[in-house]
Amino acid sequence: MEAKGVEEMRIKRNKYDITFSQYIKQRDVCCQWCGRTDGALQTSHIYSRRHTNTRWDPRNAKLLCFACHQRWHSDPIEGFEWLKSVIGADRLEQLRKDAHKVVKLTTADKDEIRASLMDTIDDDMECFNPEFDVKSWTT
Ligand SMILES: [Zn+2]
């Protein structure tokens, strides 16, 4: 399963990914799995960036520290069990369906998604819940 993580890294990050990543960092602030706020926090997709329909969908990402990101890719079963306990089976199932919808986004579509993410980036957010009750995945 480690190969999946490597494959993910090979997908080139564009300006849309960079904005998306900034958005997730502002939203989550701390590692959503272990609660760390220090060190290198990384935006981690739930369904791979290969899935265009959810590539920039805030429901499809969470902020993780380096160690938890490694853990996420090395043990996806454990990762998905944890996630299900946080967001619930129904939301996870809906996300799975949305991720597997095949869509073709134009540049205008992507620009629109990016603009709406930039609108909601808020500098004043704090790590919402040290008990890892992920705030915005559940809204
Ligand atoms: Zn962590």
Image (cartoon, rainbow, N blue to C red):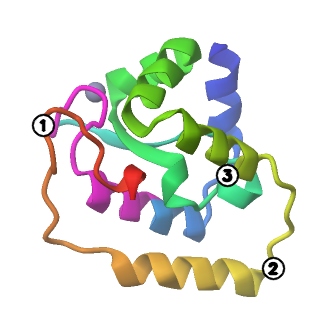
Residue with the mark numbered 1: 130
Residue 133 placement (x, y as % from top left): 25, 39
Residue under the point 61% across and 56% down: 13
Mark 2 or 1: in front is 1
Residue with the mark numbered 2: 106
Residue 73 placement (x, y as % from top left): 54, 21
Residue 115 placement (x, y as % from top left): 51, 85
Residue with the mark numbered 3: 12
Residue 70 versus residue 113: which sits nearer the camera? 113
Which amino acid lies under the numbered mark 2 shown in the image of this protein?
A: Thr
Residue interval drawn in magenta? 21-37
Lower sequence index among marks 2 and 1: 2
Residue 120, placed above or below residue 65: below
Q: Is residue 36 magenta?
A: yes
Q: Secondary structure at mark 2?
A: loop
Q: Residues within 10 Å of mark 1 (few under 14, many from 20)?
A: some
Q: Is residue 42 magenta?
A: no
